[in-house]
Image (cartoon, grey):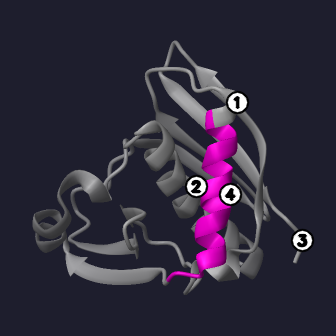
Amino acid sequence: MDDIEIRTHTALHVVKGAIRKVLGAKWTASTWVSKGHGRIAVQLFNKPGESDMKEIFRLANEKIVEGVPVKMEVLPREEAEKKYGDEIYDLFPIPAEVKELKIVIIEDWNINACNKPHTSTTAEIGEIEMDDWRFRRVKNILEVSFNLKKI
């Protein structure tokens, strides 16, 4: 994974935290990264408004500017589940044979089991901008796409 993809992947965690704060969405259905473009899909039962989406990106960029640490904990799966509960999981399962989890923590913002590389602080991501979003009512899924601005 090259630098821009590491930054974009870390941005997924920041955007997810903002989505949770604004819309209350807990479960990630899918993620995708290609260079400076990212997309996250979350389970959601009501279509958000354009103002909600703008607020998500305002908060996400605010968190990036704060430059907070992106921490990584490696724990036995059982210990991670005891410590963090189901907060660490998404709708796509981690195979049962995985006995050790890498937990990415952005304090008071996002926590997720994730085995990808990440930046050490949110400031390293650089500014993000919303590309597009769509709500898929039949699947109760909100898809949010974004791009990293050039630094």
> In the visual, does 147 lie left or right of 72?
right
Can see residue 74? yes
Point out residue 61 in the picture as x, y percentages from the top left corner: 67, 63
Q: Which numbered tag is attached to residue 150?
A: 3
The mark that comes first in sequence, 2 or 1, is 2
Q: Say which quarter of the image contains residue 112.
A: bottom left
Q: Amino acid at mark 2?
A: Val
The mark that comes first in sequence, 1 or 3, is 1
Label 4 SS: strand
Label 3 SS: loop
Mark 2 touches mark 3? (CB < 8 Å): no
Mark 2 touches mark 4? (CB < 8 Å): no
Foreground residue among 14 and 57: 57
* Quadrant where the image shows the C terminus: bottom right
Foreground residue among 77 and 71: 71
The Cα atoms of the two marked residues, 4 and 3, are separated by 16 Å
Pointer 2 residue: 15
> In the visual, does 104 lie left or right of 135?
left
Secondary structure mostly seen in magenta is helix
Question: Around disc 1, counting alpha carbons within 10 Å, would you say few (fewer than 14), some (14 to 19), or many (20 or more)?
Answer: few
The mark that comes first in sequence, 2 or 4, is 2
Pointer 4 residue: 33
Mark 4 touches mark 1? (CB < 8 Å): no
Point out residue 12 in the picture as x, y percentages from the top left corner: 58, 59
Residue 131 colored magenta? no
Can see residue 6? no
The Cα atoms of the two marked residues, 2 and 3, are separated by 18 Å
Between disc 2 and disc 1, the foreground one is 1
Foreground residue among 8 and 128: 128
Point out residue 74 in the picture as x, y percentages from the top left corner: 29, 82
Q: Which residues are magenta?
A: 52-68
